[in-house]
Image: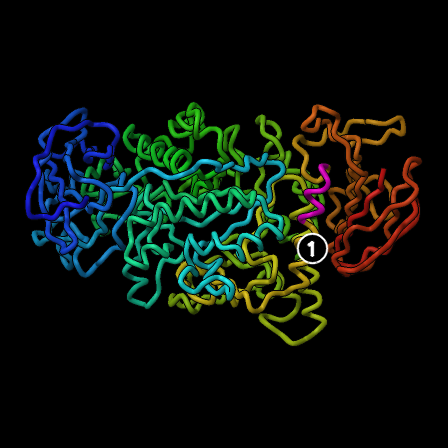
Amino acid sequence: MPNSGKQPLTLRPGKPYPLGATWDGKGTNFALYSENASGVELCLFDDEGHETRYPMPEHTAFVWHGYLPGIGPGQRYGYRVHGEYAPERGLRFNPNVVLLDPYAKALDGTEKFDEGVFGYVMGEDDLTMQTQDQKGAPLGIVIDPMFNWVGDQKPDIPFHQSVIYEAHVKGLTMTHPDVPEALRGTYAGVATEPILTYLKELGITAIEFLPVHQHVDDPFLLAKGLTNYWGYSTLSYFAPDVRYSAAARRGDYAGVVPEFKNMVRALHDAGIEVILDVVYNHTAEGNHLGPTMSFKGIDNPTYYRLVADNPRFYFDYTGTGNSLNVRHPQTLQLIMDSLRYWVTDMHVDGFRFDLASTLARGLHEVDQLSGFFTIIHQDPIISQVKLIAEPWDVGEGGYQVGNFPVNWAEWNGIYRDDMRAFWKGDGGLASEIGYRLTGSSDLYQNDGRKPYASINFVTAHDGFTLRDSVTYEGKHNDANGEGNADGHNHNITWNCGVEGETDDPAINQLRGQQMRNFLATLLLGQGTPMLLGGDEFGRTQQGNNNAYCQDNEISWYDWQNLDEELLAFTKKVIALRKAHPALHRRKFFSGRTIRGEDISDIVWLRFDGQTMSDEDWNNPQTQSMGMFLDGDGLDDVDEHGKPLRDDDLLLLLSSSYIDLPFRIPDLDHCGEWELLLDTTDDHAQETVKSGEETTLKGRSVKLYRCQR
């Protein structure tokens, strides 16, 4: 029921809650928060782009509101907000700019810079107000919220049983030959049978999507023929990005929301949870010279952290130009309303918070008891989904790995760095590796959290892929157009002797072995493993460790060139992890004795079979170890309340280039040990008697079990 633009309707008072555009079956209520505005106009647009304006006279608790009968799903709308244009005092109102509703659930396209998105005169400083119409921001669309969720069963997989797969909606499906071409790169493409079957057979339990909130492509990238592929430049916290919608490609922008919901439902039917990477620390509007598309023109001091003694400028803890003002109740409400919407209406299962330390900041310091965490923990809906923090930002004191509150998991950057250094061959890391393989008790045990609070990863979207981490030591980011100056310089990687691709079979064999070592330690250790999508089959970005702007073959999955052997290995390791509860414990190891044989729940061994001493742990030459897990030592119960049991397991690992004779534990109850995994030979079979030796080849991992 979009407005034709020819017969203006009468705006009724409406209600101040809920914020946004809410259709009730007969008409639509519009509500917009702005405590500093002097007036607000609701702007409706018809299919030809004709605009009809409705001054909103009702103003309740800083919310401007009105109700239009006869207006329903499909109607495009925006706002013009009146007030002072005084950037030196933090006010940037400009009614010449049509603004996007922060609560819009669907958008009518992407930004159009050629139609104007700036509140000041380009070429002048930001103190000169723009007087020409600026209509380049996307418009909101009134949606029908109804969707048939009947029968949708959220997988509700316990954190300790989770295996997370980080992926990009577009990159995952863009070149898959069995996904219909019209659906490639879209939510609908993810929901196709080839993708669902692949993910199920791989064995992952959750897919963590890079941002799907509508974002902005930065002008400096567009000028170079590039785009903001990763999408960490959010414009709307409620609307799925139209760029990844098959419906939007057909011009059906109202169909974006049901398409996203259908994807979630299809993944749930496959037993896979959906986690969203969300960016509540900053927006796409940048600093004082950035565009005015929404928040900045609606109520700049409410939504952004401004410099106290010069509010023309913005605090920037994110490196993007601005930081959201989470100290303000309305900004906190915006974030919570957004999170709750994605859980209740879109049925997602959790969130990974980008640069989460920014959200924790009270004044300047990072504060665990900030309003953001308090309001999250008391919320009966948000507190029950998976909450994952990227525990750092670019501000002073922003690196907060291990310091987030109970109920939060964290991307464990220390795990990544330690594992990379260990397999690179650096010495002096034995004690660190011991902590990382057991869930990083040094970081998470003393604050009430469990091993699964550690989200373990060795690669992520930001940095090298797994294959590139064993192929390159230096970044190769020339395609980004920044003279290779962007991206990390401290990669902690080893190229196995040659920089870049090579035909040398010995080097390629070693690289494959190193990838298997990373995958084995990631998936066989305690904590929650996160696999970068494509690492399971050797995806490369050609040495680019900052592919944020590469919406092309550099970032897309190359489905035509899979390393099938590596893929089979990854499936095998994931299956081993899921089959053995000793590899995904809910509780930290206690070291307690659990048998009359004086066997503890975990024992660390030297290659000669002796228990590792303090001297071994601190010896910079220690590059190998064995981790014995007693199957009776889980200190847990199964779903029926019975004591949880497993086989005894023995994980052997060595980052030394030297082959070692490793003595297997001699246990009375265990006569033979069966080899389950060897990173030097995918098809290896071996049975070793207790007390005998096996050869642990240089730079390798082995896993054995003593079957009960």
Q: Residues within 10 Å of mark 1 (few under 14, many from 20)?
A: many
Which residue appears at 44% of the width and 40% of the height?
Answer: 353
Name, please, the residue furthest toward the bottom.
Answer: 503
Q: Secondary structure at mark 1?
A: helix
Please tell me which residue is depicted at 42% across the width and 63% down the height of the picture. Answer: 550
The magenta region covers: 574-581
**Which of the 4 image quadrants contains residue 562?**
bottom right
Is 314 on the left-hand or right-hand side of 93? right
Which residue occupies 79% across, 34% down? 631
| Nearer to us in this view, 90 or 668 | 668
Nearest to the observer: residue 48 or residue 420: 48
The image position of residue 560, as x and y in percent, is: 55, 69
Residue under pointer 1: 517
The main secondary structure of the magenta stretch is helix
Q: Give the x, y percent position of residue 277.
A: 44, 45
Q: Quadrant of residue 343?
A: top left
